[in-house]
Amino acid sequence: GTGSVFHLMRAMESAVKKIGDALGVSNTDKEWGKILSDLKAKIEAMPKGEVRDSWSECHANLYHVKQAWRNNTMHPKETYTSDQAEEVYRAVAAFMNDLCVLLSRTPLSVS
């Protein structure tokens, strides 16, 4: 279970890079806290409306993944059962699906 969650968090790193590309945040190799801060600034600079709201939701979901699973998984403090790993898998899959829809509606580099 723990190995599965670890690899799911690594898969999320590719999502973070895509989000950075879309929003014009270039250095997505930083720690997630800094990346989230840079993404938030880009989102807050957007005009109010559906696109900004969708990106805000994406940002919030990414923040919660960081807090709930990534920090303790990538800095080995947590272990997971196979049932817990399946729950994380479902959450990551839902995030990735939502991100695909968002990216398909948003031209790259909306900055």
Image (cartoon, grey):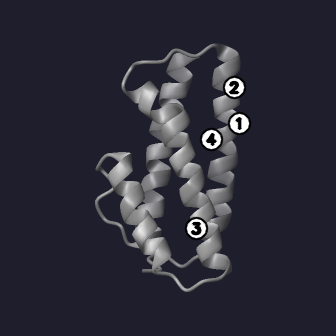
Residue 5 sits above or below residue 50 on the image: above
The numbered dot on residue 55 is 3
Residue 86 relative to residue 68: left or right: right
Measured from the top left, where is residue 53 in percent x and y?
Answer: 64, 72
User: Is the residue marked by circle 3 packed among few (<14), some (14-19), or many (20+) residues within 10 Å?
Assistant: many
> Is disc 4 in contact with disc 1, using a CB cutoff of under 8 Å?
yes
Q: In the depicted view, which residue is nearer to us: 102 or 53? A: 53
Q: In the depicted view, which residue is nearer to us: 85 or 78? A: 78
User: Is the residue marked by circle 2 packed among few (<14), some (14-19), or many (20+) residues within 10 Å?
Assistant: some
Q: Earlier in the sequence, mark 3 or mark 1?
A: 3
Judged by depth in the image, the label closer to the viewer, 4 or 3, is 3
Identify the element where label 4 is drawn. Answer: helix
Per the image, the residue denoted by label 4 is 92
Measured from the top left, where is residue 63 in percent x and y?
Answer: 51, 49
Q: Earlier in the sequence, mark 2 or mark 3?
A: 3
The numbered dot on residue 90 is 1
Disc 2 from disc 1: Cα separation: 6 Å
Disc 4 from disc 3: Cα separation: 17 Å
- What's under tag 2, amino acid-wise? Glu
The numbered dot on residue 86 is 2
